[in-house]
Image (tube, helix red, strand yellow):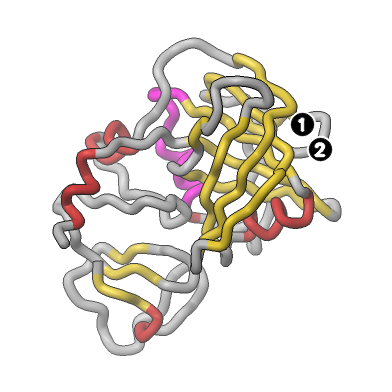
Amino acid sequence: MDRKAFNTLNYGISLVGAAAEGKRNGCVVNSLHQATSSTPYKFTVTMNKSNETTKTILKAGSFAATVLSRECPKELINQFGYKSGRVGDKFTAYEVGTDEAGNPYVKDHALARISCRVVEQLDLGSYLLFVGEVTEAEVLGEGIGLSLDDFKNSGGSTPPAATVYRTLEGNEGWKCTICGYVAEKETLPEGYQCPLCRANRDKFVKL
C-alpha cells in the first residue's frame, strides 16, 4: 500500500473546544467535516482518545469548532496543537467567546464558529469519531480558511493533535501511539520519550 496516495487530499484546519467541570480544553484538528446538507445539520470530528479535549467533549456532550483563517499565525497553531491541556488553560492568551452550552471558541483569526451537540460516536481504535448536530453557527470574519496544505507549504509541522498527519517528504517519521505526536526523525535514539505524553520509544511506530 502506498500511503502517499492519501496526500492528494487536503483538509481544513479548525480549533475544537469544549468545557466541563469548570475546565476548558481545546486543540487543533483537521478532521472537522460537514456530514449533512439538510436539517438537522450534522458535522463529524475525529479525535485522539488520549487528547484532553476528547475527554472534555465526552463529559460535556458537545463542542464548539472555530474555522481558522489562512492568515492565522503559527503561534496560535502551536498553542493549541503542541501544548497539552494538562499543563494549563490554552485559551487565556486569546479573545474567547462562549456558546450557549458553555463551550469556548477563539475569536482571533476566525472565519466562523459552529457548535454541536454530540448525538453519536464511533470507536475507531485510538480515535473517536463524534457526530454532532449543529446547535449554533455564526460567521466571525471574511477570507479563506486555513488548510493543511497551506500550513505545511508555509513551513509548519503538522500538529500532533491532527488526525491526519502529513509531512513534506512523504511517509517520514515516528508516531506516538499514545498521544499522536510525530517525531520527524529517521531514527529514535535510546531513551527517547515523547515530548507531550512522555511515552517511551517502544510506543512509537514508523510512518
Mark 1 crowd level (few <14, some 14–19, many ≥20, 10 Å Cα): some
Majority secondary structure of magenta residues: helix
**Residue 104 vertical placement versus 189 (above, below):** above
Pinpoint residue 56: horizontal percent, then vertical percent. 71, 55
**Which residue is at a point 33% across and 53% down the rendered structure image?**
165
The kind of residue on which mark 1 rests is Thr
**Which residue is at a point 42% across and 72% down the rendered structure image?**
177
Q: Nearer the viewer, residue 125 or 25?
A: 125
**Residue 24 vertical placement versus 102 (above, below):** below
Pinpoint residue 112: horizontal percent, then vertical percent. 58, 21
From the image, which quarter does the N terminus lie in?
bottom left
Q: Which residue is mark 1?
A: 98
Q: Nearer the viewer, residue 92 or 11?
A: 11
The kind of residue on which mark 2 rests is Gly
Task: Measure the alpha-carbon separation of dots 1 and 2.
Answer: 5 Å
**Residue 164 vertical placement versus 43 (above, below):** below
From the image, which quarter does the C terminus lie in?
bottom left
SS under mark 1: strand
Report if residue 112 lies within the magenta region. no
Which residue is situated farthest in the bottom direction here?
Answer: 190
Q: Is residue 169 left or right of residue 167?
A: left
**Which residue is at a point 46% across and 41% down the rendered structure image?**
77
Pinpoint residue 29: horizontal percent, then vertical percent. 48, 44
Over which residues does the magenta segment extend? 69-81
Pinpoint residue 129: horizontal percent, then vertical percent. 55, 52
Which residue is situated farthest in the top direction here?
Answer: 142
Q: Which residue is mark 2?
A: 102
